[in-house]
Amino acid sequence: MTESLPFQFDEIGYWSELKLEIVEKYGAAYTAAFKGTPRLKKYYIDGFSGAGAHLSKKTGEPIDGSPVRALRITPPFDGFYFIDMNPHKTAYLQKLCEGRSNVEIHTEDSNTFLVQELLPKIQFRNFNRALCLLDPYGLHMDWEVLRLAGQSKAVDMFLNFPVMDMNRNAIWHHPEKVPRDGIERMARFWGDESWRMAAHAESKQTNLFGFEPEKLKQPNDAIVAAFVKRLKEVAGFSFCPRPAANAGIARTP
């Protein structure tokens, strides 16, 4: 199936397949909740859509990606926005969506499109709502996207928190050795450099020699909890449930 394509489908494991199932089931419950309000417009947004198909690590067989699953949800969404920077993947997705006049596919940086074009239009006062899936390939998310979604009071968001990429590129045991690029990418995702306080804490152990207290790297759970708190207190999301462990995804309506 993939031999004639100019790209390879992403291979995903059990937890990624589980995330797809969660989003699909939540999407169906989401549209059903608005079934009695026909004037209200409901949109599905996928900020890192990919090609609409993946390969299962377990079976090696193709499985439907989040865009395809969203398109088959009933009651249906009124419109769909799929964004990805890879032109080969969006071209493939375009074929999967042929004949769907309510689908927009954009080949560009999702941060730019969401901040400048789409999210400013999704507002509670505009009588529209959106379910937004943000599953970045790593630290490729701008805080401004999350802030606009939270401030809108009209967006339910699934966010895959890229803690593994954070640990590889920014949150090191020795913070003074983190390269500038890692610091900048982390600040771009977090919104500022307050992530440093969440990622490291001074050791409570007394230092007998007068040196500065050692800064200890905090566990992943503590970093995630700090970010969830930031989503509520800074971005303005009214509710953030406990993140789904291992699946790496948190819902923030």
Image (cartoon, helix red, strand yellow):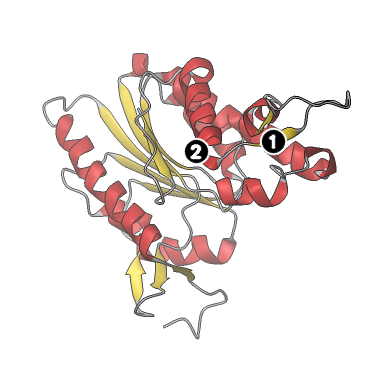
Left or right of 55? Residue 110 is right
| Residue beneath disc 2 | 221
Q: Position of residue 99 (x, y in %)?
A: 31, 59
Counting residues from the N terminus, which is met first, the one under dot 2 or under dot 1? 1
Q: Position of residue 80 (x, y in %)?
A: 36, 44
| Disc 2 crowd, CA 10 A, few/some/many (<14, 14-19, 20+) | few
Residue furthest to the left in view is: 36
Q: Residue at x 37, y 18 (%)?
A: 238
Q: Residue at x 64, y 45 (%)?
A: 166
| Residue beneath disc 1 | 216
Q: Amino acid at mark 2?
A: Asp
Q: Is residue 164 above or below residue 232?
A: below
Picture disc at residue 200: none
Q: Amino acid at mark 1?
A: Leu
| Displayed quadrant of residue 123 | top left
Is any part of residue 151 visible from this angle?
Answer: yes
Q: Residue at x 38, y 58 (%)?
A: 15
Helix, strand, or loop for circle 1?
A: strand
| Disc 1 crowd, CA 10 A, few/some/many (<14, 14-19, 20+) | some
Q: Residue at x 43, y 62 (%)?
A: 93
Q: Position of residue 69 (x, y in %)?
A: 29, 56
Is residue 250 or residue 144 the one in the foreground? 250
Is residue 162 or residue 111 the one in the foreground? 162
Q: Is residue 151 above or below residue 134?
A: above
